Amino acid sequence: MIKYIDLSHEITNDTPVYPGDAPARLSQYRYLDTDGYNCFKLETGMHAGTHIDIPMHLIESTVTIDKMPLDTFAGDGCLLDVRGKSMIGYEDKYLSYVSKDDVVLLYTGYDNKYGTEEYYSEHPVIEKELADFFISRQIKMLGFDMPSPDRYPYEIHKILLTNGISIIENMANLSKLLNVGAFEIVAFPLKIRAEASMVRAVARI
Amino acid sequence: MIKYIDLSHEITNDTPVYPGDAPARLSQYRYLDTDGYNCFKLETGMHAGTHIDIPMHLIESTVTIDKMPLDTFAGDGCLLDVRGKSMIGYEDKYLSYVSKDDVVLLYTGYDNKYGTEEYYSEHPVIEKELADFFISRQIKMLGFDMPSPDRYPYEIHKILLTNGISIIENMANLSKLLNVGAFEIVAFPLKIRAEASMVRAVARI
């Protein structure tokens, strides 16, 4: 029996975005009682809510997210519990946890600040040694429940993306994976000619 | 070894939409050489490209697509080859093909007209007897490589949606499923507070 766990924040007209990003605007423009059907329209950048950054976001590339192979965005999941750390560093025990082609998820617990200013200004950051470890392990993708792995000038972003590791930002509900054993992550982006995509990130158990 | 087949059309600045729907506009607003990063923004209705209609699109409901259970949107796939028919009707052989909770895909071949006016005005339609069969079989979702199961006044749309069968419209590449044996469909919508969602529809083999 397959069970799915939703790891995504909701896209609404109030969805918070990273400072400087295009806001998300969601509005209804057709109504059942007057038009015969309901329709909403959305105006947004690609980095609203739970989304995937690919190399083209920060490095010279013409490969948009629609051109990337689907199996880039699905694979065995590996949850690392990193709650309570402001600097998320490498630990030797990760050698036995993380395998090639894993989708690694960092559970910071910081999504409890989602929707506050602090969420963007005070979130934990990933140390270079840990990013280098993920690269040497050839993981497939890195996700976390915070808005960014780093702050300006975005060195960790660039190290990961330059080495072909795409990033799932603003994940939710990672606590639900703490005691589930083996799981897969499925996070297929929209087939959109862009540098990132909003995504429904899901664990399949 | 899991293999994925993409069943989705691309979202670009030229993505065609159903006559009367909000157009899709995709444009770049940040550039790596001047801003330090690339960003695109999207303005669109939910029915651009490959997308899912849920009951709220055409019937009285307050349940937006983000509120629907994830397992509504994934399940065993069942491909029916209905190429060459302008009216897609019930056939007795479907009794042995279609099971409860299947995601049924109608392969019309009509996606070879995608991007033309004819795609919207001349597409095949589904007969009521076939819609009733899908309802009696309690299928999970119905998808097809054409823009709609019907034309105004959208009786088939309403029959399916009223009975809880969501619809994947504008699918692509269904020919690739002709000889693959068993497959699953994964088509998780964005977690968006709306009556429909663009979707990356994928077959998992």
Image (spheres, coloured by chain):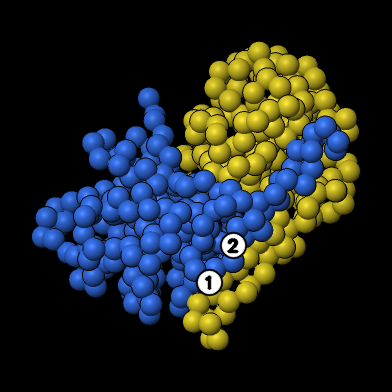
Chain colours: A blue, B yellow
Determine the chain carrying the residue at label 2: A
Q: Residue at x 58, y 29 (%)?
A: B103
Q: Residues within 10 Å of mark 2 (few under 14, many from 20)?
A: many
Q: Return the x and y of residue A201 as percentages of the image width and height.
A: 44, 47
> CA–CA distance between discs 2 and 1?
9 Å
Residue A199 lies, with reference to residue A138, above or below; the image says: above
Q: Amino acid at mark 1?
A: Gly
Residue B85 lies, with reference to residue B92, above or below; the image says: below
Determine the chain carrying the residue at label 1: A
Query: Would residue A136 be seen by someone viewing this image from the given angle?
Result: no
Q: Which residue is mark 1?
A: A20
Q: In the picture provided, is A52 more to the left or to the right than B43?
A: left
Which label belongs to residue A121?
Answer: none
Q: Return the x and y of residue A66 as percentages of the image width and height.
A: 56, 60
> Toward which corner of the image does residue B66 lie, by quadrant?
top right
> Toward which corner of the image does residue A178 lie, by quadrant?
top left
Residue most toward the left? A92
Q: Amino acid at mark 2?
A: Pro
Q: Return the x and y of residue B156 as percentages of the image width and height.
A: 79, 26
Residue nearer the viewer, A82 or B14: A82
Q: In the picture provided, is B38 more to the left or to the right than A124?
A: right
Q: In the picture provided, is A129 more to the left or to the right than A183?
A: left
Disc 1, SS: loop
Disc 2, SS: loop
Count up the numbered dots: 2
Q: Residues within 10 Å of mark 1 (few under 14, many from 20)?
A: few
Circles 2 and 1: CB distance less than 8 Å? no
Query: Is the N terminus of chain B in the top left, top right, bottom left or bottom right quadrant?
Result: top left
Q: Residue at x 34, y 70 (%)?
A: A150
Q: Which residue is mark 2?
A: A23
